[in-house]
Image (tube, grey):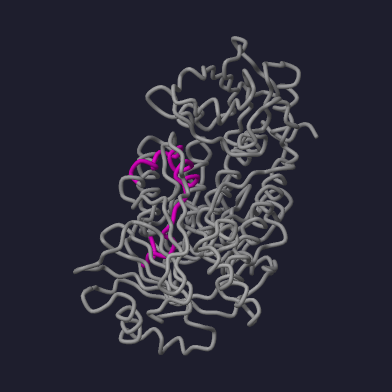
Amino acid sequence: MLDERYKLAFKAYPYERNADQDAATPTRHPVVIMGGGPIGVATALDLGRQGIPAIVLDDHEGVGMGSRAICFAKRSLEIADRYGCGDPMLAKGVVWNVGKVFHEDRKVFEFNLLPEDGHKFPAFINMQQPYFEQFMIERVRELQAEGAPIELRGKNRVDAVKLMDDHVVIDVMTPDGPYTIEADWLIGADGANSPLRGMLGLEFEGRVFQDSFLIADIKMQGDANFPTERWFWFEPTFKSGASALLHKQPDDVWRIDFQIGWDVDRKEEMKEENIRARLDAMLGPDVDYEMVWSSIYTFQCKRMDRFREGRVIFAGDSAHQVSPFGARGANSGMQDVDNLGWKLGMVLAGTAPERLMDSYNSERAFGADENIQNSTRATDFITPKSEISKVFRNAVLNLSEKHAFARPLVNSGRLSVPCVYDGSALNTPDALTGGPARARPGSSCPDAPMGDGFLLRHLGDDFVVLAIDAMLPASFEEAGLKPRLVTISSKDDSSGQLAARYLGDANSAVYLIRPDQHVAARFNTFDEDALRSALRRAIGQEA
């Protein structure tokens, strides 16, 4: 009745009968989330912390086996930190900032993704996806114990949905048989193969790249002299693939990717002796290792035309899919959740009009297009489709070894950074004369030192009016909202990084910051009328 599509790393939400199964008529819920992976659970965390009841339906009972996503970006960790699970992730993860690129056996250059100090979190940590999910589920359990209205329902498979004008009807199958519920809003977080998309007959268009990549997660012993860095080889001399990637994970596990070509016999390639032959050629005779997990994947860059279909919203891989080089999959999904949660919360509370949900589509579709563009460029560079493309690629690599001008052209995967919502209808035109571009309207707030901590912890997840070396009134209210008023001094950071990131050449600044910590507006000083208008615009009440 309910087939196991994959093996579990651990059982996190075993099946339990719920009251909806015995209801005489379908129960109506504010939000139902289809999919219990990282994006579905993160969405439940976001909403549950706001006091909004959220039910997660998943056809399994826990977290799937295999490392899958391993690179979690600074922005994802900052989001997780607001949810209350950033610290254990940082403690468990392998921290790295440096990457090295090789052509054959020569290092052509290296890069540092976070060359500046003054951030709580590093550019990236490496951590197997099951750990990332586990920490969020543990946080759900903590919040449930405190009364948060979150439910995780395992072995609850969504079989059919029906869109109505103001809700969705959902048919669910369980080991005890079917039942039906209704939801004001249904969130599709059910992955790249999204059954929900299929139920609604929605397209998922894009490009499939004709190449195959073998993943091998191994636990190394012996003389494994690799630092905690990202190493990428083009045309490696060990000839285990046309390209190769090496990353360290927790528990002494290493992720290795080999580019093995399009016309391969996948069943043959997945035999352990054949995987070991590639690994042995790369690692040499002095390294002993244990194979932990392996898989073969093909690049795809696709997205839905729209991420909203009436009262159904799509997030994560169900809405968009990119190649794994650049770590833009799970990280972009976390940005989806960050964008969606506060907007849906305000709409359900009646604080914002329903049209605010359309800005989720416009902002995150913009982010998806940016990710797909970067991912496509990386894939074209890694897997040149013609001889002349390969000649160009190799010329760039050869020049990069000695000439800095060529290095920006090397593309082994542009790594995930937060999307800047330039041009968003929720932004107010920039009014901070001399302000730094990195904190312009639409950008995510850069972290900065503040006293004995960091700025983002002080912002939280409310609307905030942040004044730096500027005066604020005792209170401020507009459109039924009372943003938190935070006044700080650039002198709170003796390093000067706070001033550099938020003031630039300005003497003072007042920022309006959204609950997802994106800048909605900024001014040199407090301007009551302008700030009122900016707040209305940021919640969709003013065009």
Residue 156 placed where, x, y %?
47, 61
291 vs 509, left or right, is left
Query: Is residue 373 found inside the magenta-colored segment of the image?
Result: no
Quadrant where the N terminus is found in the figure: bottom left
Question: Which residue is pictured at 44% across the width and 70% down the height?
Answer: 233
Q: Residue at image x 51%, y 27%? A: 498
Q: Is residue 47 visible?
A: yes
Please check the rendered image and state whether residue 81 is part of the magenta-colored stretch, yes or no.
yes
Q: Is residue 176 visible?
A: no
Range shown magenta: 63-88
Q: Nearer the viewer, residue 128 or 371?
A: 371
In the image, is 478 to the left or to the right of 497?
Answer: right
Where's residue 519, x and y in %? Answer: 63, 33
> Can you give x and y, in whole percent of width and height, for residue 134 in the image?
36, 53
Give residue 159's quadrant in the image.
bottom right
Residue occupying image coordinates x 31% and y 49%: 92
In the foreground, 301 or 62: 301
Rendered location of residue 37, percent (x, y): 46, 58
Quick check: 374 above or below 184? Answer: below
The quarter of the picture where residue 537 lies is top right
